[in-house]
Image (tube, rainbow, N blue to C red):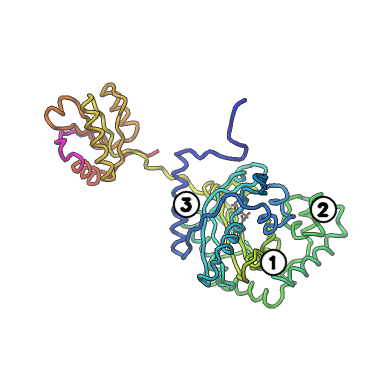
Amino acid sequence: MELRAVRGMNDILPDEVVQWHRLEGAFRAHAELSGYAEVRTPLLEPTALFAREIGETTDVVEKEMYSFERHGDHLTLRPEATAGCARAYVEHSIHAREPVTRWYTLGPMFRGERPAKGRYRQFYQANCEIYGDAGPLCDAEMIDFVASFLRKVGITGFAVHINSLGSGGTRERYRAALLSHFLPMRSELSEDSQRRLEKNPLRILDSKDPRDQKAAATAPAIHDLLDEEDAAHYGGLRRYLDVLGIAHVADPTLVRGLDYYTRTLFEFRATSSDLGAQNALVGGGRYDNMIQNLGGPKVPAIGFAMGLERLLESIPREPLRTGLDCFLAPISAEGAEKALLLSRELRALGLRTEVEGRGGKLKRMLGRADKLGARLCIILGPGELERGVVQVKDLAAHSEEEIPLEGAARVLADRVVGGAGGARGTR
Ligand code: HAM
């Protein structure tokens, strides 16, 4: 039997990791500019955390979680980060330290969905959460954060969809209105929706099944049911988005696949990539009840997550600078010892350096230096060492010279910094 990576789970090889570092680095810098601090929570959480907070009748909890029992505990590989962060917020009484908390986290999530382009079983999210601010300004600022991040990394083809699910009373009224709409057409719905109808009619609006989509097209819109405070919140958000110049679609069909949301929902959808049905780049919203549900005080919250694979699919690949600064080519046993010491000095000065440790002919070593895109090839042969020098071939300038071995590291560092700007290599 051939052993391969688990279906829907990807190896990310070094060439690609460089692109990942770039995106993650840009995200960290952007998050820190807006006052978010990094939090890291476990990949495993109690199954009950997700079942309760994400919702028993969601696809994620019903069909997609990787759950198992070990040492008497029911555990699940996290399908998302929000519930785990909220658990940590409550567990460490963060509310007692500060009135408003801004956290970000980066890492892998696990959902047993049907794999497709942009949809994987292990995927990575960049996630932000704000606890302690209930107002629409906070929502607008978060949406602006996402929009400016996407532009910063070169993604401009996206549409911002927003909606409000209201809070307490509104949600109940909406549930009742949806139930009266869907009940008479029950037999025309998908099997999942027929089963979930009474418990969670909202899920039908989110279904990808054409039968459900047909029934949902004529469903009542929640906007007509928002109470005064919910409507004021939604209106406030839209005004702030206008102030920020963020074009947005007020989309009553946007309900999102997780049950914890209250009031504001938002999604950024790619409009100019070939992600097909997986065009949701970023999804988020308010979840004002979760902290209290988990045993904490009444603290409102809002957050979002973006799928890093989907972002990377949407960003043009830039050529990478992967070349070396120095390649050391020792031609004798003594040369090898000197090369080992010189390489340590060069790296301490910040030069990317490799030593040819396999011995062999100079010609092959020069070929290898060229292949690696090295800027300088430093030859340590018996003749040179006898004279206390090394030979330096500048592979970019096609020149060569001898320099004293003593103090060579400094001289080489000056050559690299003062020359054509370091390593030559691009891939
Ligand atoms: P979500 O909409 O389930 O929300 O996921 C957010 C983003 O993660 C999606 O827009 C997509 O880019 C990416 N994503 C989701 N599933 C997959 C998959 N199977 N393969 C690849 N990428 C995927 C959440 O997870 C919420 N926790 C967001 C949030 C944070 N809400 C409040 N705070």
Q: Which quadrant of the figure contains the N terminus?
A: top right
Instruction: Give the number of the disc on residue 165.
Output: 1
Relative to 274, is 167 on the left or the right? Answer: right
List x then y, in percent, for residue 279.
61, 51
Magenta segment, which residues?
A: 397-409
Crowd class of label 1 (few under 14; some 14 to 19; many from 20; radius 10 Å): many
Mark 3 and mark 2 lie on one chain; the one further toward the N terminus is 3
Relative to 211, is 245 on the left or the right? Answer: left
Residue at (23% x, 24% y) in the render: 333
The answer for how far apart the CA atoms under marks 3 and 2 are is 41 Å
List x then y, in percent, for residue 375.
28, 37
Q: Name the residue under label 2.
A: 195
Nearer to us: label 2 or label 1:
2
Q: Does the magenta stretch include residue 407?
A: yes
Task: Choose between 381 and 236: the one closer to the eye.
Answer: 381
The answer for how far apart the CA atoms under marks 3 and 1 are is 31 Å
Q: Do the residues labelled 2 and 1 touch (CB within 8 Å)?
A: no
Q: Mark 3 points at which residue?
A: 24
Residue at (60% x, 60% y) in the render: 87
Kind of residue indicated by mark 3: Glu
Q: Which quadrant of the figure contains the C terminus?
A: top left
Kind of residue indicated by mark 2: Arg
Task: Choose between 88 and 286: the one closer to the eye.
Answer: 88
Q: Is residue 309 magenta?
A: no
